Amino acid sequence: MLRLGDIAAISAGYEDPPSFVARHNGAPAIIVGAVMARGGNVLTFGKNLALAIDEVRAKTPVGIEIEQIADQPRVVEEAVGEFTRSFVEALIIVLLVSFASLGARTGIVVALSVPLVLAVVFVFMNILGVDLQRISLGALIIALGLLVDDAIIAVEMMMVKMEQGVDRVKAATFAWESTAFPMLTGTLITAAGFMPVGFANSSTGEYTGSMFWVLVIALIASWFVAVIFTPYLGVNYCPISANYIRITTR
């Protein structure tokens, strides 16, 4: 029986010469990567990791320093903050424009469609397993500018018919009959523009694929809200216009 020790000297140690050398700030370093389990909360992971680093640092011998060179939870937190700011800014702009051009009650009808659409998007993102990460958050920021278009079209059509003397229910029905299909067509065409991103069979497509699905969900949800929820709110909250006076002659 031939043993490996009979033909070679074996000892524990580092590979010499090393095939890979890590350096940080000009000094040799050992890189340790910590990866979050799938389905976890990255912000909670970041807090737990910071506690673990502090605990290990307290037990580290003098001369060895522990320094974190990448902090993905912080990046995600900044991205969430950026989305929140963009959402608030977009909502304020929508409110101001809607209130200035459509009036207070009509503006409220349009503004209420935004949080409802986002709630639907978050529910379907959870069902499909799409996490809140940089690409999905970027898709939501892009979608913010598209969420209120259908609602504005529907409520404006209602207001036009009500100013012509049509009652609220018939105005809401007319808004559905005249705008539902054209809005759906526009929604599907816009979503189709992002199909290459969602179905790209490459590493880039795998990384950015969630952008397509989030946008599709947001656009379709905004259409459903515009043709169902917005007319309902319009019937209950839109003011009855007195701009038009019906004149009859004998």
Image: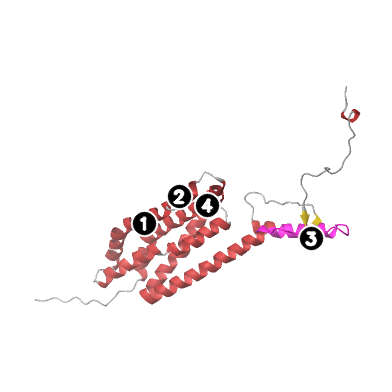
Name which of mark 4 and mark 2 comes first in the sequence.
Answer: 2
Residue bearing the label numbered 2 = 195
Q: Nearer the viewer, mark 3 or mark 1?
A: 1
Q: Examine the image and state in which quarter residue 71 appears.
A: bottom right
Q: Nearer the viewer, mark 4 or mark 3?
A: 4
Does the segment drawn in magenta span residue 63? yes
Name which of mark 3 and mark 1 comes first in the sequence.
Answer: 3
Residue bearing the label numbered 3 = 54
Q: CA distance from mark 4 to mark 3?
A: 35 Å
Say which quadrant the N terminus sits in: top right
Q: Which mark is residue 210?
A: 4
Q: Nearer the viewer, mark 3 or mark 2?
A: 2
Name which of mark 4 and mark 1 comes first in the sequence.
Answer: 1
> What stretch of residues is rendered in magenta?
46-72
Q: Tell me the residue at 35%/58% (across/down).
A: 183
Callout 4 crowding tier (Cα within 10 Å): few <14, some 14–19, many ≥20:
many
